[in-house]
C-alpha cells in the first residue's frame, strides 16, 4: 500500500510495474503480488487513512515499513510514532550529514546509508 501526493507519480506506476514484471519474468524471478494498492492524497490525512482501512482492512498498525522522500519527515515520523506498531521501520531518503531525531523513533543508522538514507525504528 502506498500514498502519493503527486498524481503524476501514480500515473507512472503501471508502465514501470509492467517493465519490472517483464524483466523479472525474463530472469525467472518472483513477480510482485497483485494486491498493491496506491492512493492519491496526503499521508497525514486521517480521513484518507479511514478510507484505506475501509477498502483494504489495513491500518498503519498493520505495516512494518514506511518511507518518505525529502518532504514531511517530521509529520510522518509523528504519525508513525503514534500509530505504527513497535519495531516498524521508517526509511527517510534525501538526508545529508545531519540526521534528525524523532520522538518515539530510534535512529538505526549512525551515518546516512549511501550518504542519503537513514533508518529509524519505532520504539
Image: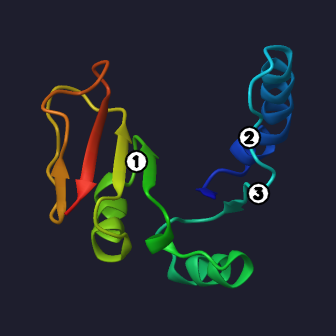
Residue at 50% x, 70% y: name it. Answer: 62
**Label 2 to label 3, Cα distance in Å?**
9 Å
Q: Report which residue position mark 1 lands on.
A: 71
Across and down, in percent, residue 4 comes to 61, 54
Residue 8 in which image quadrant: top right
Density class for disc 1 (Cα within 10 Å; few <14, some 14-19, many ≥20) is: few
Mark number displayed over residue 35: 3
Q: Earlier in the sequence, mark 2 or mark 1?
A: 2
Q: Earlier in the sequence, mark 3 or mark 1?
A: 3
Q: Report which residue position mark 2 lands on.
A: 32
Across and down, in percent, residue 19 comes to 83, 25
Rendered view: 85 above or below 72: below
Residue at 63% x, 80% y: name it. Answer: 53
Q: Say what secondary structure mark 2 lies in.
A: loop
Compare residues 83 and 41 and report the one nearer the observer: 83
Across and down, in percent, residue 20 comes to 78, 26
**Which residue is situated farthest in the top direction here?**
27
Amino acid at each position: 500500500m502506498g500514498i502519493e501526493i503527486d498524481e503524476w507519480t501514480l500515473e507512472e506506476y503501471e508502465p514501470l510495474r509492467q517493465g519490472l514484471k517483464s524483466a523479472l519474468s525474463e530472469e525467472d524471478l518472483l513477480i510482485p503480488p497483485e494486491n498493491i494498492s496506491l492512493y492519491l492524497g496526503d499521508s497525514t490525512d486521517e480521513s484518507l487513512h479511514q478510507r484505506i482501512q475501509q477498502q483494504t482492512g489495513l491500518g498503519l498498525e498493520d505495516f512494518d515499513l514506511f518511507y518518505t522522500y525529502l518532504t514531511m519527515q517530521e509529520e510522518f515520523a509523528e504519525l508513525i510514532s503514534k500509530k505504527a506498531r513497535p519495531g516498524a521501520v521508517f526509511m527517510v531518503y534525501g538526508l545529508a550529514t545531519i540526521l534528525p531525531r524523532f520522538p518515539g523513533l530510534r535512529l538505526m543508522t549512525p551515518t546516512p546509508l549511501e550518504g542519503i538514507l537513514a533508518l529509524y525504528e519505532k520504539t
